[in-house]
Image (cartoon, rainbow, N blue to C red):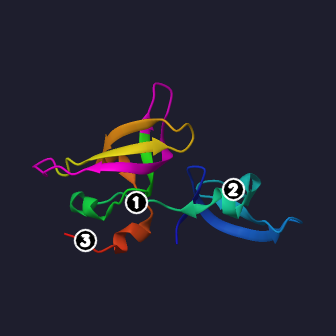
């Protein structure tokens, strides 16, 4: 299973420990970084499965309430931000692919935006969903 922390890909967990509170932590080595950059992080708060982009026809697997990463491009940076699907507006697909619209709400500031699927990535578990057409 590929893991991601704070938008960095995890290469390996080199050690683990439990804090007095019982919270698990892991010592993380990130892809492209050496041991001098290893960092202790809280597993429950900071580690998640790596999200994947869906194929155009897989939009039918997305449900209201799903977690997603949405690509945001600002004047100073471009990054994926945690969001939740609030509404799905199904549209006919055309030569450009999926034209469906997704109303999302960003976790960090609760703002909402309407986006196309090409800006979204989802946890791999969504791939196992059967279509309900």
Magenta segment range? 72-96
**Between tags 1 and 3, which lies in front?**
3
- Is 19 in front, or is 64? 64
- Going 74% across and 65% down the picture, which residue do you hit? 26
- The crowding category of the residue bearing disc 2, from other C-alpha atoms within 10 Å (few below 14, some 14 to 19, many at least 20), is few
Q: Report the side of 88 relative to 111 (left or right).
A: left
Q: Report the side of 21 relative to 82 (left or right).
A: right
State which tag comes first along the sequence, 2 or 3: 2
Q: CA distance from mark 2 to mark 3?
A: 43 Å
Q: Look at the image and say whether residue 51 sits in the magenta stretch.
A: no
Where disc 3 sits, the SS reads loop
Q: Report the side of 7 relative to 33 (left or right).
A: left
Q: Look at the image and say whether residue 92 sits in the magenta stretch.
A: yes
State which tag comes first along the sequence, 1 or 2: 2
Q: CA distance from mark 1 to mark 3?
A: 18 Å
Q: Which mark is residue 131?
A: 3
Quarter of the image that includes the C terminus? bottom left
- Going 14% across and 52% down the picture, which residue do you hit? 93
- In this rendering, is residue 122 above or below 124? above
Q: Quadrant of residue 29?
A: bottom right
- Going 50% across and 26% down the picture, which residue do you hit? 76
Q: CA distance from mark 1 to mark 2?
A: 26 Å
- The crowding category of the residue bearing disc 3, from other C-alpha atoms within 10 Å (few below 14, some 14 to 19, many at least 20), is few
- Is 69 in front, or is 110? 110
Q: Which mark is residue 34?
A: 2
* Residue of label 1: 52
- Going 39% across and 49% down the picture, which residue do you hit? 86
**Between tags 2 and 3, which lies in front?**
3
**Marks 2 and 1: in contact by CB < 8 Å?**
no
């Amino acid at each position: 299973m590929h893991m991601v922390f704070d938008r960095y890909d995890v290469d390996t967990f080199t050690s683990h420990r439990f804090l007095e509170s019982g919270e698990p932590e892991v010592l993380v080595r990130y892809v492209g970084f050496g041991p001098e950059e290893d960092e202790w992080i809280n597993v429950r708060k900071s580690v998640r499965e790596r999200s994947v982009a869906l194929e155009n026809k897989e939009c039918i697997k997305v449900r209201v309430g799903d977690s997603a990463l949405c690509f945001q491009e600002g004047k100073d940076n471009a990054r994926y931000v945690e969001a939740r699907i609030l509404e799905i507006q199904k549209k006919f697909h055309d030569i450009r692919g999926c034209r469906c619209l997704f109303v999302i709400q960003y976790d960090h500031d609760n703002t909402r935006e309407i986006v196309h699927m090409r800006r979204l990535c989802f946890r791999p578990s969504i791939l196992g969903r059967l279509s309900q057409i």
